[in-house]
Structures are given as structure tokens and as C-alpha cells.
Amino acid sequence: MKISLSILSLLLASAAFAQPKVYNQAIINTTTNVIAPEDEAVENIAQEPRGGMNFRNMMDGETKFVTYLKGDLVKTSIKSEMGKSTLYRDNSKKLTTMVMEMMGSKNGFFASDEDMANMQKRRDSMMAERRKADTNAARRMPPMERNQGTTDISVTGETKKIAGYNCIKAYLITSRLLGIKDTAIIWYTPEFKLNNVLSTGGLNSMPGMGNMMPALNGLDKVEGFPMRYEMKMRRNRKMEVEVTKVDFTKEIEAKEFEIPKDIEIKPMSEMQNMFGRGGGGGGGFMRGRD
């Protein structure tokens, strides 16, 4: 047994120096689990605020993701106890569309990359003003620098199979200002990468929320595809994301990426009207990890 494990480790180490095959078409099934602390007080679980929904605990529990990739088009179907959502991404147009089905209603929103960047700037500005007004808040939640910091990848000798692929364990360690370090454990396969998709599942699949996961900022440096990752979240939560199935052979028809025509698609900035300004002002949905 020790000999076979040594051989497997040697093969994976050799594969790590080879270039992964890049696929332009794939179907990836992924499961995300957000584990809340067992001793969390009931009074800390946010209730629905007046004027809108509260997504404070939106990712708690298990969420299933199915990602479809075909060239510049990416579709992600998301199912959880809260409802269903579908994300459509057109990389050639730099456009993201979200369709949400919750509590018997359907809503659609769209945003260009420029729109998302402008909304992020407004949120950062509002958070900065809040920190100035509340020094205690500044200590509780230091600012997260956008696109700043350096990420180191520490590859270990541990290996295991995930969804049929040999994977290597590594640590992503991102150093930010104020001496803050964010660490994520990843298991990646050096066998392949996906065009236009760095990872599946987790908050990275949600528009505008990938920037709120600085521990995963270095995924573009990984020479392979992350099949599993584990990381700490705010409020003592833990996120575990794992790929359960990979299919490179099934043909994906163009109609898979067609946005439903029976739903009015509004600008993403109007989401604040749906979820209530009290939930985050200018994007309450993006505050799911407070």
C-alpha cells in the first residue's frame, strides 16, 4: 500500500509540471456546504427586515450547482432550500444575467462588468463611511482591499481522488494590508483547466460576491482545476465546496444558454429595491457574509 501511494504521489508530482489540458466545453456538478456554528444563538439569526428579504444566512446548509460551459458562454444552475437561481454569463459581451425563483416569484437582473465595478465602488465607499462613523465596526471588520495583496501557493504531498480525478492538496495563503492573512485549503487536479471558469460552486459563482472571498484570489495561479476547497467565513462559519461529477463528452445545445423570455430582466442595480435598502444599501444581496 505504501508503495502504491508513493507511486501515485510521484505521478502527481510529475503531472504538476505538465500543462493541464484546457477544455472549452464541460458540465460540472458541485456541492457547497456552509456549516454554521452549533452554539450560534437564535437571536443572532437575522430575521426578514422591513421592506425586503435578508440574505444574511443565504448560503447556510447544502447548495447544489451545475455549471455548463461552451466557449464564451457559462450557465450555472443553483438549488438550495431558499429556491433556485440561474446565472448566465456571456464572456464575449462581458455580461452577467441572474434569474431568481424564490417564494413563488421570478426575478431577473443583468449587469455588465463595468456596472458591477461601479456598484462595487459605491459599496466600498459606503462601507468606508460606516467605518469612519463607527470605530468598533472598523475593528470588527477591517476593509478588504480589492485586487490587492499577494497569494502564495504551498503544495503538500497529500493526494486523493475526487470525482475520479487524482488531486493534490495545497494551501492558498493571501497576505493583505494590516498584516491580515486569508487561507484556503484546495485539492486540485493537474489534469485539466476550464476556459473562462476558475472554479465552480461557492460564492465565486454569485455576481459580485467573488471579490468577498480574498482567500481564493490566487486560483488563477493554480496549475489545474480546484476539485475541492475549504475556507473559513465570517460569523464562525465554514464553507466546503466539492466537485461531484465532470462531463466533457456530452454535447451542450445552444438553447441551454437562452435566457427565459417570460421574465422581465432589470438592471442589477435595482436589486436593492427588491431586498430593501436596510439590507445593505445599494446591494443588500451582496452582504450575505456579514
Image (tube, rainbow, N blue to C red):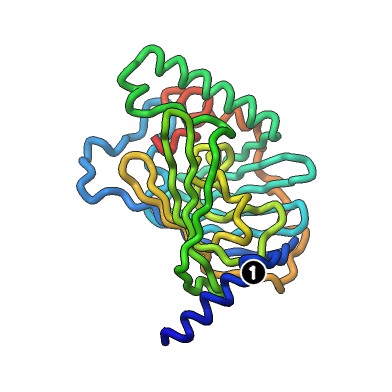
Image location of residue 109, percent across then percent down: 63, 37
The quarter of the image holding the N terminus is bottom left
**Residue type, mark 1 in image:** Glu
> In the drawing, does residue 160 fall left or right of residue 45?
right
Q: In the displayed structure, would residue 34 be above or below residue 252?
A: above
For this rendering, which residue is in front, 108 or 284? 284
Circle 1 is placed at which residue position? 191
> In the drawing, does residue 285 fall left or right of residue 13?
left
Residue at the image point whose x is 54% and y is 44% from the top:
151
Please say whether residue 279 is visible from this viewpoint.
no
Please say whether residue 136 is visible from this viewpoint.
yes
Image location of residue 36, percent across then percent down: 31, 49
For this rendering, which residue is in front, 114 or 272? 114
For label 1, the crowd category at 10 Å Cα-Cα, with few meaning under 14, some 14 to 19 and many 20 or more, is some
Residue at the image point whose x is 29% and y is 39% from the top:
45
Image location of residue 66, percent across then percent down: 58, 60
Residue at the image point whose x is 66% and y is 42% from the top:
97
The quarter of the image holding the C terminus is top left
